[in-house]
Amino acid sequence: MPLSLPNRRRLRLSATAAAVLLALLAPALPASAADPFAAPAPPAAAAPSDAHRTGLDRAALDRTLRSLHEAGMYGAYSAVRDGDASWQGAAGVADVKTGRPVTPQLEHRIGSITKTFTSVAVLQQVGEGNIDLDAPVGRYLPDLIPGERGRAITVRMLLDQTSGINDYDHVIFVKLEDLEKNRHRHYDPTELARIGLAGPPLGKPGEAHHYANTNYVIAGLLLRKVTGQAPEKYITDHVIRKAGLRHTYFPRSARLTGPHSHLYEALYEQFDPPRDFTDYDMSWAGTAGSLVSTMDDLNRFTRTLLTGKLLRPSELRQMKTTVPTESPLMRYGLGIFSLDLPNCGRRLWGHDGLVWGSQTMTLSSEDGRRQMSLGTNLTHYYGVEADGKTPKQGPIDYARLAHLGQALCDLPAQGPAAGQLVPTPDSHQLAR
């Protein structure tokens, strides 16, 4: 049967999760300016007082994470840091059959957060003079993107997603059966890039932000060309190890090798019960979305990045040069997005990731002091609205927002977001 999704291209679009976050943390935003994919906001949270600006309320973090599980999320694990203070927590189950509980240090597929790692690697090569951000990508990959198109699209446009190149994922995932068919299929990145390049352009080069995994698969091919190494090896040696990460890696097979949760996909209630997609060949995502990490490693990574330990100041400045997106308070840089949250009073930087059965969000204050990474193991748990396009929102989403608001801004959420929820055991959600 056809793969019926509200919008396949938004399965892994960072604006999806960001828009929901904005609904809680920026409730003063006029309704006319709301993201078109965002659900109606839950009741507004109170603005944080100065007393909430320091330290971590560990009891509140524990409570909001438990509420996320009680709302219907199978399992959740989170890590929060405020300066030298840190907290890690987990709630729920890692295996619905055995009841094995989740723990804070589980390894987790982080999806499109991989893009931030890939961008750092490309920018390191920019700093070494081997890549020019504003050079045409055809200079480096003339056989892949020849002619006028190769001259019009720059390296920068790949990284800030303004190239106009179409995506490949809605070509390789067309039917429900394709999710199983691709479970153990290995894709070559050049094949994926050619599929995306063959699709109708989403816009003129440099015209507007159009999120596509193809851009970051091509960025990986660019790394291979200029370094002479597999991009996964280069990123491991020069980004992951340089950041001191001990539980972050590109998987060598369809299986996760370290302690991990099972990952469950409901596909907007088309899988009932949700299907286990823990084992999956992630070559279809490659340098756009295949990394595995822990929540604590993600916090360490963003802190190391934003405090200038992975890139020189000039390249970090380029990374934080942003373009508008569909969300009015979110802008996309080079593999990282910014969120300006009025109720929080701070700018946040980070990315989110969505792969089958796994959803992740990592966000940090600009100075790297306040950080939060959250992973969940059930994706696309609700259906869609009557229009057939808009994903439904419900108790799980509001509980997630309550935890994010507490973790990032010390916001004592009210109403549904406060965890005053009716448990929904069959609720489910996907990530990719």
Image: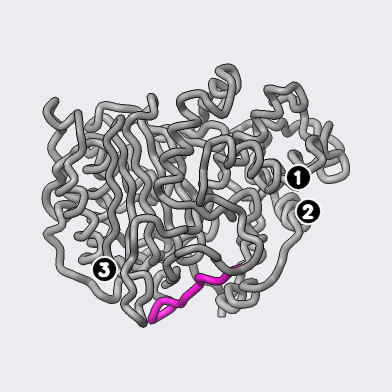
Looking at the rendered structure, the secondary structure element under dot 1 is helix
* Mark 3 and mark 1: Cα distance apart in space: 40 Å
- Residue at 47% across / 75% down in the picture? 276
Along the viewing direction, whichever of 184 and 166 lies nearer the viewer: 184
Quarter that holds the N terminus: bottom right
Residue 277 is covered by the magenta coloring: yes
Q: Which residue position holds label 3?
A: 72
Residue 34 is covered by the magenta coloring: no
Along the viewing direction, whichever of 150 and 417 lies nearer the viewer: 417
Marks 1 & 2, CB-CB < 8 Å contact:
yes
Q: Which residue position holds label 1?
A: 221
Q: Is residue 357 above or below residue 294?
A: below
Position of 272 with respect to 134 (left or right) is left
Magenta residues (range): 270-280
User: At which x and y percent is residue 281?
Assistant: 63, 67
- The three-letter amino acid code for the residue at tag 2 is Thr
The circle on residue 365 is none
- The three-letter amino acid code for the residue at tag 1 is Leu
User: At which x and y percent is residue 283?
Assistant: 67, 60
* Mark 1 and mark 2: Cα distance apart in space: 8 Å
The circle on residue 190 is 2
Position of 369 with respect to 168 (left or right) is left
